[in-house]
Image (spheres, helix red, strand yellow):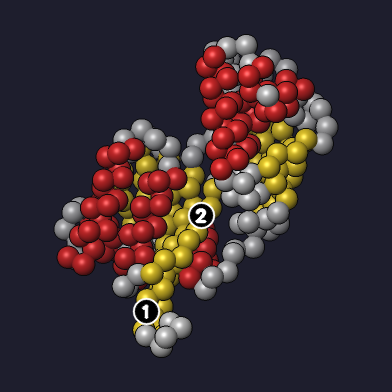
Amino acid sequence: MNQAFVDASWNEGPDAEGRLVGVGGWGLVLIVPGQLPARFQGQLRAPDNNAAEVRAVLEAVRAAPVGEALTVHTDNEAVIASVGRGRGPEVLTVAAREVLEEVAARGVDLRVRYAPRTRRHMLTAHELANDARRGLGTPGLTAARSDVLIEQRAAGDEARVSLRRPGERVTAHVPLDVMSEVPPSAQALLAAVGLALPGEVLVVRRASRVAQALWHRPERALRAGAQATLQLARRAADENGVQVEFLDVG
């Protein structure tokens, strides 16, 4: 089950012309089985905190895998009522409808649940939201360079991916599909690259020669399905400003 922990922050203050405006920030931690936790944040104009909270749910749906179930955890009862049950405050009707339209478009099976802010991932989402509202990038979220170590045993059905960025070190066990058209070593590399944050440089250690070659030249893949998967991953990385560097060969 994919899970997202979301929170928002909001404050009202004068703009450049002295008019009072509401500025909000949203943050979320997305957890997909077999992958490293991914963190996202953003700033927006919002009439109140509840609107910013609903935006966090919307972004969670957008970031989650298409066609899969997603449980969103929030400490905001108004969000649970409006998005989860369709009977929240009238001011949130339009925003909640936007979430449900995105859910339908992406084929996501959405559930919205309460979680106290004291939970670890909820605290992280809260910090992300506060930093976004203040216009600050959270340390470690947009780190310039991150080290990635890929460990894979010969003929194994699992790879271990260790990612270290400033203030964060995570290890994930990535299942490998031996029936896939994408070689196992390339699957492990794609799992690591898919967790990169926008603008991040991944310094990858122990990627195989095959994985490196296919990353640089997806058209070298022997099968069309593998080529398409690799090209899509490269395109997504390029669009997000993600760079991949290889230090050595495993």
* Displayed quadrant of residue 218: top right
Q: Position of residue 56 (x, y in %)?
A: 39, 57
Q: Position of residue 182 (x, y in %)?
A: 59, 19
What residue does disc 2 label? Answer: 40
* Displayed quadrant of residue 19: bottom left
Residue type at mark 1: give it. Val
User: Foreground residue, 221 or 70?
Assistant: 221
Q: Residues within 10 Å of mark 1 (few under 14, many from 20)?
A: some
Q: Position of residue 35 (x, y in %)?
A: 56, 38
Q: Position of residue 139 (x, y in %)?
A: 64, 63
**Residue at the right extreme, as displayed:** 248
Residue type at mark 2: give it. Phe
What residue does disc 1 label? Answer: 21
User: Foreground residue, 165 or 21?
Assistant: 21
In the rendered view, does 221 fall on the left or right side of 108? right
At x 63%, y 37%, the residue is 192
When the figure is inspected, residue 23 is found, relative to residue 184, above or below; the finding is below
* Number of the front mark, 2 or 1: 1
* Displayed quadrant of residue 47: bottom left
At x 29%, y 51%, the residue is 99
Helix, strand or loop for disc 2: strand
When the figure is inspected, residue 188 is found, relative to residue 121, above or below; the finding is above
Quadrant of the rendering where the C terminus is positioned: top right
Sequence order check, earlier mark of 2 and 1: 1
Helix, strand or loop for disc 1: strand
Please count the marks in the image. 2
At x 60%, y 40%, the residue is 238
Label 2 close to label 1 by CB (< 8 Å): no
